[in-house]
Structure formats: C-alpha cells, structure tokens
Amino acid sequence: MAQHYYDKFTAIENKQYNDDAPWINSSASIGPFSSYAKSYSFDRVNNKYTLGPAWGYDGGPVNIGSIVYSLSGNFLYRHSAKEYTYDPTVTVPVNSVYKDASSNTSSIIDYSKGSPVESNIVAEDGTYPVNGRHTDGFWYVRGAAVGPSPLKRVTIGSSIQGNGGRKQVRLNNGSLFAVSFMNQGLYLHRSLDKGLNWETTDTLSVASPYIFVDAALTTDGNKIYALFTYRASANICWVYLNIYDNTGKRTNTQILVDGNSSGYLGAVYQCSITIDPTNGYLYAAWECITTARPASKNIRMSISTDGGLSWATPMDVTTFNAQYWNSSQPSIAVNNGTAYISFISQTGQNGFNLNLTKRTTTNQWTNVVLKSQSTQLVNTSMVVDKDGAIHLIGNGTSASGEVYYFKSTNNGTSWSTVKELVEGTAVNTAYEPSISVDRNNVVFVTWYQVRPSSTLLRLCTRKLTNNVWSAITVLTDTAQHLQHPSLLFDPYFKLSFNDTPPMLYGMGGSPRSVWYEGGFSTNQNPTITLISPSNSQTLYENDVINISGDAYDADKDQSVTVFYQINSEQRKVLATNVSQTQITLSKQITFKGGKLYDGEMVLTGVLAEGVAHTLKVWAVDSENGQSATIERTFYVVPNRAPLLAIDAVVPSGIINTDKFKISGTASDQDANSNIKVNYRINGANPVEVYNGAGGAWEFEVSLAQLVVNENTIIIEVIDNYDAKTSKTIKLNKNEVKTPILQSVARYKISPPKGSARGVLIWVQRDEELDLRVELSMTLVGEQEQYILLEADPDKIVPVTDGIVEDEYYHETVEPKDNIILKLTTTRPNISIDNKVYLIMGVVE
C-alpha cells in the first residue's frame, strides 16, 4: 500500500448546543411593541437566543403577524398576537409559550484542528484520517505521497527519440501530457496523478508509406501545442502542429508549419518547439533537407504570434549545401523575444562543431561556435532558466561519449568555460543528454549509458545547485534497454524537481515502450531568515547561543517545521506552525561543561576547542519543500579547572595544643573567574580559607584535630562554574608513651588582701606517697625563692584507710604578694600509683 506523509496536531474540543428546548406554556402577555421581534436566532456555541429585526410602530394600527418573540434572560417567549391599535397602557393577553436555553437545550461535542505536534510522519494510506481526529485523540492531515513516482508505462508499441524537443508538458490544472510515436502512429497521453497512471487521449495515424519522424510539445499552461514531422519519401515531407485543450482534446488539427507534397522539402528529421511566456509567441525549429540545398541538412525555423493558428514563412537558419556539411539536432529556447537555437554542425569530413545561434529583431542570425573537434559531435539540448541564463549541453561521439556543459548569463554574448559532465571512456559513455531547470534554478542533466559488463543501457543524472555539480547518480539500472531520456521543462517555473527529475524515456526490445519516472512539486519552498547568532561567535562557560529569526511558507493548508542541527548531531525541532503564518524563531542554547544544552537536555558531546563548529537552521513544509539552509560557525573555549599549589608542609609540636601552618596559592586561567579554597580533615565538613580572583591562602592545623596514625587533609579549589582541582596531604600522628616517675605541680596562692606574711597548708595524700613540699614568698617582680617545708610528724592525721593529712606552716617577716606552692611527687616504678587528693590552706 502507498505511504503518505502525515502532520499531527492537537484536537480542540468544541461543545455546541442544539436548539431543541421544548416550548412550555406561559401566562405572559404581549405589551408595547418596542420589545418584540419577528424572528430569532440561536447561538450554538454560547447557548443563547438572539432576537431578529424588531417591530416598529408608526402610530397607527399594527399588524404584527401571527407570531412575535420576546427575550428575558435565557427565556425566549413566543407570542400569538393579532392586529390592534397601539396603546402603551394596555397589555393584550395572548397565547404564549417559552423556551429555557440555560437548562432545556442539549449539547454535542465535536473537534477541530489545533496546534502542530509533529510533522512528516510516514504511514500507510488509511492509517490516519485524511483531515480529521484519530482514535488516539490527535488531529491528522495527510500530505504528499512518499518518494518519487514509480515507473509507469505510458503506452506499448511506441517510442520517443531526439532530445532537442520536449516530449512532455504540465498544465495549470495539474495534468501531465506526453507524446510518443512509432511508424504510422503518434499518441498523446495524459496523467492526472503526477505520472502514476496514464491514459491515451489522442491518436494520430498516417497510412503507409508515411511515417512519423519526431514530435515535440510546449504549453501556455492551458493549451498543448504538439509539433510533429512525418514523411512518405524524400520528396513528401511535412511539419505540422496540433492544438489540444487542457483535457487532451484536439481543437485544431494539422496546422501547416512547413513542407508540401510537391517536393519543397527533401526530408525532415528532429524538431523542437517552445513558447515565450511573456507574450505567448511560439517558436519552432526543425532539421531538414530542402530541394534548394539537397547536399546538406540544415536548420529552419518559424514563429507564430497567434497561438499557433498561423505561422510565418520559415527561415533558413543555416545554409550549407555541400557534401559533409550539415546542421542537425536543433534545440530551441526563447528569452524575452530572442530565440536561441543550439545545433550540431559538420564542416567537412573531419570537422564537428557545437553551435548556438540567436535571432535578431531583423531576422538575422548570429552564430557562436562553442565546441570544435575532429571527432563527431551528436545531440544537443538547451534551456533558459528563470533568470535568463542559457544552459546548453552537447554530446560527443559514441566512441567516447562525453557530455559538455556551457552557460551564458548575457544572452549568449560570452560563455563559461566548458564543463565536462561525463568524461567519456570505453566503459563510461554517454548518449542523448537532456537538460532542464526547475523554479529553484537547479539544473538537471540526464543521459543514458552502457551498464558495466553489459550491453544494456541505464539512466544517469547530475544536477547543478548554486554553481556546484553533484556526483553522477544512477537513476534506473534494470535489466532493460533504457534510452532517449527527455526531461520535463516548465517555462513558467512553477515546479520543483525531486532528486529524480520528471522524465520520459524509451525502453528498447520488442515491443518498444515509453516510460515515465521522477517527481516534482508545485509547492513553494518555505523561506527562513536568521537574525542571530552572528557568525564566528566564541562561547565561554555558560555563554548562550541565541537563535532568532523567522520562517514563512506562502502555500495554503500546510504545516511548517523549522529544524536546527549542531555539527552532525541529530536535528532538533526549533518551531512548528501552519503555513501563511510568520513563524517566530527563538531558542537559547547554553554552553557548559564543554557541551551544548537546551535547558537540561544535552545536545552535543564534548566540543573541541580551537575548531569551527556549525549551527544549521532550515525549514521543511508538509510537502517536503525545504528552505535554504542557513549556517553559522562558532567556536568554544571550555572552562578550565583552576590551579592549586601547596607549599611544603612542616608539621610541628608534641602536644595537642601545638599548631602548624599549611599554605599555598590558587589561580584560574579563565577570564572573569572567582575561586574558593576549602580544606577537609579526615572527611569532616569543608572549611573555606580563600574566596577571590586568585592568590595566596593559608590555614592552621592543631595537633588536636589529628588522630593517632594516618590523617588525610584534602585541599580543593573550585571556580564559579564548579570546575574543581584538589590535592591530598597525608600526615602521621605518633603517640609517645614514656613513663613519668616524678612530677611537679605549682600553684599560685592569691591572698584575699593582696599579700600575707604566713601560710598554713594541709595536704591529703596516700600514706605511701613520697611528697616534697616547697614554698616561695617574694614580692611581685622578684625572683622566686623556694624553701622546703617539713610536715610535723605529730600532726600527721589519718583520714581514711591508707590516706593521711599533713600540715605545713611558713611565715615571713614582711607581707609578700607573690606566693607559689610547689609539690614534687616521686615513685620508684610505674606500678606504684599514689596520689594527692586534697590541698587546703589559710593565709594571714
């Protein structure tokens, strides 16, 4: 089953009301006419009644008819009334009924197309509605068929040959017409579905010994002009024109262009016809031998200024008349009244030229030789694009098979350097190239050539887009004998061609046949304008690419999707809307962490620094028409991690209150950066020690913060974009347990009066403790002088079991204010653990 493109939209729920509320009896009476009307209407969306034109009053009797209506809120009243004289004081009782719009009407739900959701969904025909709501709740619109038209046979038992004249045309009503011929039959074919199916609309027959030699078509968009040549013998030859309407019906038959039965023409061959879109004039050219110049083939042409009904006396374009001097293969084109004819000329036994000649207003012909060579030249085809540039191709001999391309942008005065589209070799020959151009000024050239390792023929093409030629593409490569391609040309430039241009070609064998392939679109491509970003933008961390601009599609009833793409990443949808609407483009893409983000969605991998990256933006409509692709380059400078340096660490101290410093510097290579330096000891919470643009930092560590054995100190620097650098310091803290056998404790005694002459001290201790008590009594500022105090043995008092209390006393001559008590204890080994329990005293 055929596939189509579908566009998906939201479905809008529409609630509508029916005017089906019942009429209910009312006791209302008709009063003054100013509030009554002859009719009413019902608003299905808002569920409201509205009165029609009101009755007026002219001061006399008023015939209000049998029915009038009045309105009160949601209530519509219908009154049966009669003729009476207006009296504002009188209310006339009538038979009245009413409807209640607020509660008595019923409602229904239907749907309409909403906003675009997704474009170009490929599905088999019938998967979704053509234009309606699907069971999934969304609205779908079916678009064009997927892919180019498949191969279709036009007719059996006929052929085409000669690529100088066009074998097909397209009319304004969308129909395609093609011409084919074989011996005594000439056929006109029509397709109403872009070449999918064909029918024969007219057959022109001649009796033997007549045969058709060539035929060519052109159109003004509404009529078909079919030029054809036929002959019975060398002395009975004709050039005729048939005119057809847009259904393929013949309206004018066999209008004579040239020739008669009395030998005016010696022989006829290929012909070509075209139309000047500016005025409708027809131009025809053909190849013939005349009785006036029987030794050579020459080119003749004529012009019709009345739509083909009559033709001017034919003109001789070339006038050779000698052996090995011939002109052949004419292809005619026109641009604003100037006719151009390209043809092949032979000038002697070993001289061949590719010529272009143009007609002046005085019917004189100026000739330019575009290509000269000693080997044979055959076949030429020419077209004029919508800008007036001439595109012309010629074909080398069958032994080498070159295709030469020429272009002129100044009416044939000068020409571009020849381009060899096919470099003919023994395995790469080209025959009968045909040229055309679409409304986008894309030039297409198609030819046939021998298949590799085969005697069969296949079709190939190249196209010229923005002055760049594509590679050779093989279009059709079947086990058939394919030849004589003829491309469609629209002189009004309404068509865009697919990658496979629309063409007729012949299929050899028995029986012969004519086939159609390719595709085109009458759809206008959307346009796009990009305001930002500028080209060559450089992005730093957290910088933003602002995509702004607009897109537009002039066609009706289409959806338009605008895409953007970063480098070769997957394309993303930038905007979607309906055609004939100015589509505003707005998107912000953020550069962070080396990647591009749309919000939280990652668009790219890590982008390399120092190389150009590309942003592409383009629009595609639902007929697959595509705008030009706008490109912007940009560069990135990813955020670099800040730098951290640590000075040599020298731990010091032997007790927990001791401290040592750790110091260093921090910096950042990026502009406008701010950095913080933190440290953590053994996994504790970080402590900030620096915040700024960069510089020196330091902090202190006390031994108390460290644990015995290994300690880990992590120092890290973090910039304002969360890039981080950290370093680790490892320190070992050793626990030294040296036994202490003697200890000294000093106590300062502060007398309540500031000084004292005598001190009485009591010390409670283990009875076995070896205790030495000393006392210094000096003035503040004097050197301490200790004297040994002896306890009175008679005053050693037991306190509890094993604990005794000693008494000591000392007195000076004068009061002293710097009084220090020193106790020294001694134990013979670490197994003895005697203690001092209490020290008390009195000063005087």
Image: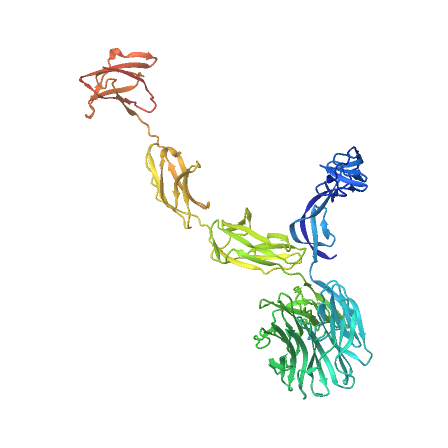
In terms of depth relative to the viewer, which is nearer, 48 or 130? 48
Quarter of the view holding residue 223: bottom right
Q: Position of residue 300 (x, y in %)?
A: 69, 81
Q: Is residue 23 left or right of residue 405?
A: right
Quarter of the view holding residue 829: top left
- Name above or below for residue 540 compared with residue 737: below
In terms of depth relative to the viewer, which is nearer, 24 or 237? 24
Q: Is residue 582 left or right of residue 39?
A: left
**Residue farthest along the right direction in this orientation:** 207
Quarter of the view holding residue 83: top right
Residue 747 visible in the picture: yes
In terms of depth relative to the viewer, which is nearer, 71 or 624? 71
Q: Position of residue 129 (x, y in %)?
A: 73, 51
Residue 713 visible in the picture: no
Q: How is the image coloured?
A: rainbow
**Residue farthest along the left direction in this orientation:** 813
Where the C terminus falls, by quadrant? top left
How many marks overall? 0
Q: Is residue 253 left or right of residue 331?
A: right
Q: Position of residue 808 (x, y in %)?
A: 24, 15
Q: Position of residue 735 (x, y in %)?
A: 36, 33
In terms of depth relative to the viewer, which is nearer, 781 or 468? 468
Where the N terminus falls, by quadrant? bottom right
